[in-house]
Image (cartoon, grey):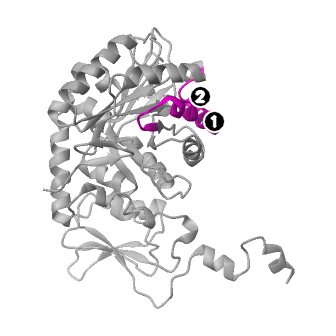
Amino acid sequence: MADLRINLAGIKSPNPFWLASAPPTNSGYQVQRAFEAGWGGAVWKTLGDPILNVSSRFAAVSFNGQRVAGFNNIELITDRPLEVNLKEIYETKKRFPDHAIIASLMVEPKQEKWHEIVKRVEDTGVDGLELNFGCPHGMAERGMGSASGQVPELVERQTYWVKEAAKTPVIVKLTPNITDITSTAEAAVKGGADAVSMINTINSLAGVDIDTWNTIPHVGGKGAHGGYCGPAVKPIALHMVGECARNPRIPIPISGIGGISNWQNAVEFMLMGATGVQVCTAAMHHGFRIVEDMIEGLNNYLDDKGISSVMDIVGKSVPKYSDWGNLDLNYNITARINQDVCIECNKCYIACEDTSHQCIDRLVDSNGVSFLKVREEDCVGCNLCSIVCPVDGAIDMVEVPNDLPPMTWNERQAALGLLNGTAEKVVKS
């Protein structure tokens, strides 16, 4: 079996599957049960000054029969006393010395506050610290969470303050509620961060009850925006991980978070540059035992690939992730319908005719049997027909050979003299 152990900025764990800082890591009882189930690490629910939580905190978005396709919450950081949390962290680490325990921290943006909590938390024996600069609701209104995480200067300054006092590795958790997440990731690097984790939850409102007109969730008839997570946010998170992983100014490990529900998702994040992954919504939906399938699936995947260590797949897809201007304009694919598999539901025809390039014809053969056929010369290879097709194997997207050399948009524009400020010269000539 493959070696699933990881080392993220000096933090070691028996596998890459960690529980994210959230309700599942709110107590020693929960974290210990998670470790017994097989989780490699846990980021303790964010510690800070005791706060009050509201009643009615969660909401979910279900789609097309899938429960909890997206998850929304307006819960804040731990509402349990710091002393109680520290005692349980110490006891849990003593019982599970080989599992990673990371303390998530959030305090006011003051140097002395950070120094104080870092020293108290590290006395419990934690393996690392995660600075919560991502929480989008409740704490942000108090100048913490994403209020700090959206300002690169504050990220850099507070990371630096923590590093002044910390003896364990420091992970900076980034907010996705920003135009360019690499700007804050770079700020974390400048502040001395040992790693970054992403993404925290996305600003959201789960829904509105059209009978009562209350928001979902609501607290006594009033609502507020919350944090969105779950499978629906995975593409956003994967993109942001990839953007940071391919940025040479962010040369530190990444802990991937956002919609990870199975071992396949974990592999995607690791290929895109994450050293390990953190899971929350899937555990809340299905319980801690889901990690058993994650571990088994990842082991089988690595064995099938002939890969001895999970660390060997980290970042393997990053060189393939680029900018649109670097894509080959001469590469071409087309759709082909497999008549032996097609059930003639007409979904591909309708999608192409109404919303794409009108290149699927409905024909009748010599026996009077109707069938669908793609006019390949008009097909642009958009993939829409294969996406809406309900039958696996009914539509293939195949490469169309041609004799044209690769040509990117950037290469084309450079050849025309339209890059690097030379457009004016071309126009004059």
- Identify the element where label 2 is drawn: helix
**Mark on residue 341?**
none
Q: Which secondary structure class fits the magenta region best?
A: helix
* Residue to which mark 1 is pinned: 151
At a point 32% along the width and 33% down the height, the residue shown is: 280
Of all residues, the one furthest to the bottom in this rendering is 403
* Residue to which mark 2 is pinned: 147
Toward the viewer: 308 or 239? 308
Q: Is residue 224 visible?
A: no
Q: Is residue 255 left or right of residue 49?
A: left
Toward the viewer: 4 or 164? 164
Of all residues, the one furthest to the right in this rendering is 428
At a point 20% along the width and 80% down the height, the residue shown is: 367
Q: Quadrant of the C terminus?
A: bottom right
- Identify the element where label 1 is drawn: loop
The amino acid at mark 2 is Ala
Which percent across, then down, holds residue 153?
Answer: 65, 37
Which percent across, then down, holds residue 386?
Answer: 34, 64
- How far apart marks 1 and 2 lie (CA) works out to 7 Å
Contact (CB < 8 A) between labels 1 and 2? yes
